[in-house]
Amino acid sequence: MKEFQDTVLPLTSRIYRFAYRLAQNERDAEDLVQDTLLRAYTKFSQFQPGTSILAWLLTITRSIFINRYRKQQREGQQVRFEDMDIDIDRVSPADFGKTDEDPETYLFRNVMDADLRDALKRLPFHYLEVLILVDLEDMSYRETSEVMGIPTGTVMSRLHRARKSLQADLWELGRKRGLVKNNIRTIGDKQGREANHG
């Protein structure tokens, strides 16, 4: 089907980025992409021309991910030995602490990225999903609303709450690390106003 190849296949990298952010590992993301493409191919006649093909594809990806997640919750997650990425025989003490990076690059790549990932993981899934689609995938509120099957106002509300929650989490992290003074808070924060005025 030439139309499928011309319209869907160029969006594979966008599907993969979304799948990776949902699944948080390469193997599951690749499986999600394959299943999305297969389902999109078999259901391509149901796509409505004039609507966003990307929104349609990400809706399929999201649906597959949620169904898998629910299945894992029912069955419990199982880890097979062959699926483990660690080759114990090849790990040596010399592997630890090796880096050609300057300390600042190492800090931002390893520590801050890990802290940001942890902060994102603490967000409720329905907030994280909106944040991924709007801020990371650069989708409009309308497209995000289509993907998630919720009103645009709900998208905007969830995005606002996700950003505020993430901001508070990262602010607290900065405070604990001494990067931010204890008495300074974000604009609009009640405690911050009280600390600055009283």
Image (tube, rainbow, N blue to C red):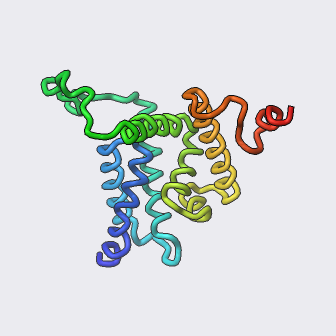
The mark total stands at 0
Q: Residue furthest left?
A: 89
Picture coordinates of residue 182, whole percent (x, y): 68, 29
Task: Tell me the residue at 65%/48% (across/down).
Answer: 158
Question: Residue 103 occupies which quadrant of the picture?
Answer: top left
Q: Residue furthest top?
A: 93
The quarter in which the C terminus is drawn is top right
Picture coordinates of residue 65, whole percent (x, y): 43, 46
Is 79 or 11 nearer to us in this picture?
A: 11
Task: Tell me the residue at 61%/64% (across/down).
Answer: 142
Relative to residue 159, is residue 68 depicted above or below?
above
The quarter in which the N terminus is drawn is bottom left
Picture coordinates of residue 118, whole percent (x, y): 48, 34
Left or right of 98 in this view: 67: right
Task: Tell me the residue at 33%/39% (across/down).
Answer: 102
Q: Residue furthest right?
A: 198
Relative to residue 192, is residue 57 depicted above or below?
below
Picture coordinates of residue 44, whole percent (x, y): 39, 69
Task: Tell me the residue at 71%/37% (across/down).
Answer: 185
Is 8 or 179 nearer to us in this picture?
A: 179
